[in-house]
Amino acid sequence: MSDRRSVAPNDLEAFWMPFTANRQFKKAPRMFASAKDMYYTTTDGREVLDGTAGLWCVNAGHCRPKITEAIREQAGELDYAPAFQLGHPKAFELANRLAALAPEGMNHVFYTNSGSESVDTALKIALAYHRVKGEGSRFRLIGRERGYHGINFGGTSVGGIVSNRKMFGTLLTGVDHMPHTHLPEKNAFTRGQPEHGGDLADELERIVTLHDASTVAAVIVEPLAGSTGVLVPPKGYLQRLRDICTKHGILLIFDEVITGYGRLGAPFAADFFGVTPDIMTTAKGLTNGVIPMGAVFVKDEIHDAFMNGPEHMIEFMHGYTYSGNPIASAAALATLDTYEEEGLLTRAGELAPYFEEQLHSLKDCPHVIDIRNMGLVGAIELEPIAGEPTKRAFNAFLKAYEDGLLIRTTGDIIALSPPLIISREEIDILFDKLRKVLMNNI
Ligand code: PXG
Ligand code: PLP
């Protein structure tokens, strides 16, 4: 047997990296050594401004003392407690805090370890809910083109990203998709919610009619689609989805994995848009990205429908080894404290007009074909290089990284979602750097 310690620490071969061009990365790795507040420091000692809150998750900025301390303390006090048929106080305390933060009437929380697990949990809750109510014929799930709901089989099935789906066979059966709402020919360079496309919600009515409402369990959408390039919901669209779901007894699931915990300027997108779903999936910002954890919020009537039958029986056959893990719970409680103490759940709203102004000032840069924004989320869509889609945005990503700015790209779209602690000065730095990148022959 080989001595593991003899493996050189700089051997990059063994780690098969997620959603990464492995061979390219390993030829010219980009590595972070540390982080503080708005900045990463690379292993070669350069500072990089975090324009993406890690992967849309570090909402309070990096290495925040309260969160770090809570994790340290919890690890030394109660490291793990079994999650099934046993508990620990912090998981309950956190659920109460979350219920208080959630939209009215969503007072129950199911813990997961990621957004993908939150989505699969939500889909299972929806199917099981109809069944416990005696409507087991409702088995269909409806997602949307260009939707991202993580990478487990349920989320991949309701998701609408072809490249994430095509390798994996039949996925879940009984799934249909609504059209996406991205209408660049009508809505390009819209600030905030687009005027056109609200009527695309009527496609749901068409799909429900096709399958008959009695077969449809749930509709899942991101209130604002993040991963596929920041698609802001057109005016009236989400309310119309809500109305159609209510009319037909279909559960509406908002996937708030990105929009949850302050990204748009309210605790949840449901608050921001004034449309309340039946189930809400969250993860990422719940623990400031520091420890894996997700939470699925459900309306009381959904939870209560399960609380039937003999009391010694398990009501919902679902759960994870790490559901409500003590260290994750402690991290989440400290994260909520930090958000509340610093007003971060509404701060994006205060900064949004300034961020929007700066973002849209890039309109005249070469190759920019659209700019979209909402809260502290922005997207700049670039004209693809002929015959080489995604390359222009990836070039921008590499140049920005060299210049000390972290951006995220999807296709030929640059996405921005800085930590909610960003200052106006840092917004200026971010857009100065980005302007230089875009002007630099990418
Ligand atoms: N739902 C939504 C709406 C998401 O944005 C997930 C589910 C899955 O979460 P996990 O924790 O399983 O990754 C997500 C995740 C990007 C990017 O660059 C987006 C996500 C993850 C990684 C990168 O757009 N979103
Ligand atoms: N696979 C096996 C063999 C297991 O025993 C378990 C959990 O006990 C799992 C998968 C699921 O793991 P988790 O609960 O961490 O999602």
Image (spheres, rainbow, N blue to C red):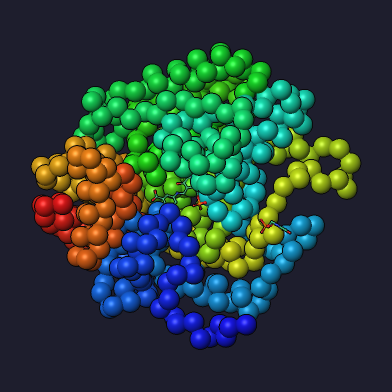
Residue drawn where x is 74% and y is 30% of the image: 131
Q: Nearer the viewer, residue 54 or 303?
A: 54
Number of numbered discs overlaid on the protein picture: 0
Q: Can residue 229 be seen in this snapshot?
A: yes
Res 423 visible: no
Q: Residue at x 56, y 37 (%)?
A: 169
Q: Against 69, is 246 above or below?
A: above
Image-based side of 184 in relation to 341, left or right = left
Spot occupied by residue 256 in the image (x, y as percentages of width and height): 48, 43
Quarter occupied by residue 238: top left
Between 21 and 219, the one lying in front of the other is 21
Question: Residue placed at 63% from the left, 52% from the top?
Answer: 111
Residue sitting at x 29%, y 36%:
192
What is the quadrant of the N terminus in the image? bottom right
Residue 268, above or below 209:
below
Residue 395 rendering spot, x and y as whole percentages: 22, 54
Task: Please give left or right for residue 363 compared with residue 157 in the image.
Answer: left
The x, y position of residue 101, in whole percent, is 53, 48
In depth, the one of 337 and 87 nearer the eye is: 87
Residue 212, image x, y percentages: 61, 15
